[in-house]
Amino acid sequence: MINEINEGPEKNFPSLPLEEWRETKNTLHLFLQIIGKIRLSLFPHINHWWNVTLYVSPRGITTRPIPYNFGNFEIELDFIDHQLKILTSEGSRRFFPLHDGLTVAEFYSRVFSGLTGLGIKTGIKAVPYKTFCNDPFPTDTVHSTYDKEYIKRFKTVLTGINGVFEKFRGKFTGKSTPVHLFWHSFDLALTRFSGKPAPPMSGAGMVDREAYSHEVISFGFWTGDDNIPEPAFYSYTAPEPEGLTNELLMPSSAYWGSLRGGAIALLMYNDVRKSESPEKTILDFLESAYLAGVKSAGWDYEKFRSPLV
């Protein structure tokens, strides 16, 4: 049993070692892919795939309202009561408990049964997208771990970081994504745009061509995977400009790494937890990574600087 943390910075930034909750994380990741694909199937397309993402809610993770038949509905993973909830604008609802032993197959079946019961008809390609597992959702009885203590920690981390990202987002007056969660890669992300088209990505598929059709500087947080096996904050600039990795990052524990052949700025979550002011440390990192991209890519810093913050 994990000891509760009630005081100090660790209340808002609890430890989240990947190896101690990897199986829960993997099961949750597949749950999110299912509800994310439902949003993808029904939500009107938005540039750069903003229509596919999920969002942090007061109780967990949500699709936000999805238009349907001149009304809307919302699917939420409630990490306080540990329930999957489907709510409609007409006042109808369906829900079922999230618990250890709930397989991906059963989750998939119960979600679609709930949608059918509410008169919502849709379908998805029922296999994971670009992740650790290729098993079809309807037959996946392997992934079924749901540790409520670690889910609680994950919710605490996600809620706090979402707020810090929102504060950082407010400093920029140009085109910006919402703070959103990508269900294929399981990261909370925020992207700023210069407004300029980017050169076509050589060999890129449809998804990447649309996502990187314009110059971007992206920021995010993930809980770790096989490439970076611990929670971390990150930033990258695309297209990657010459000299990017020569720029200074803050705090001193942040560094330039490499991922899939490109440069990425990294700050480990555990370094944030140990800092005197975790929020300031995150904001310093985000701002330094942004300035690195702005300087090396030739963006107009003053043009996008908010006079209000």
Image: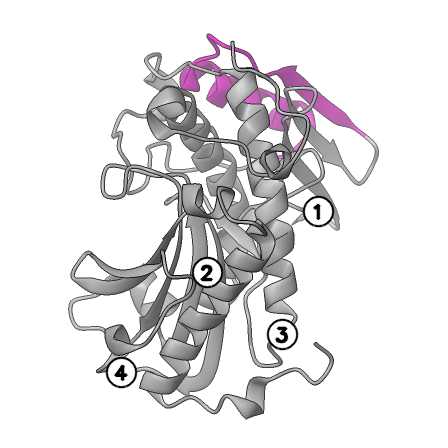
Label 4 residue SS: loop
SS type, badge 1: loop
Residue 120 is covered by the magenta coloring:
yes
The residue singled out by tag 1 in the image is 69
Left or right of residue 1, residue 247 in this image: left
Which of labels 4 and 1 is toward the front?
A: 4
Residue under numbered circle 3: 171
Are circles 4 and 3 on residues that touch, CB within 8 Å? no
Mark 3: few/some/many CA within 10 Å (<14, 14-19, 20+): some
Q: For this view, does 42 lie left or right of residue 58?
A: left
The answer, for residue 62, to whether it is visible in the render is no
Picture residue at 55% right of the left edge, 91% below the top: 302
Judging by the rendered image, the residue that carries numbered circle 2 is 49
Circle 4 residue: 199
The residues bearing labels 3 and 1 have C-alpha atoms spaced at a distance of: 37 Å
Neighbours of disc 4 within 10 Å: few (<14), some (14-19), many (20+): few
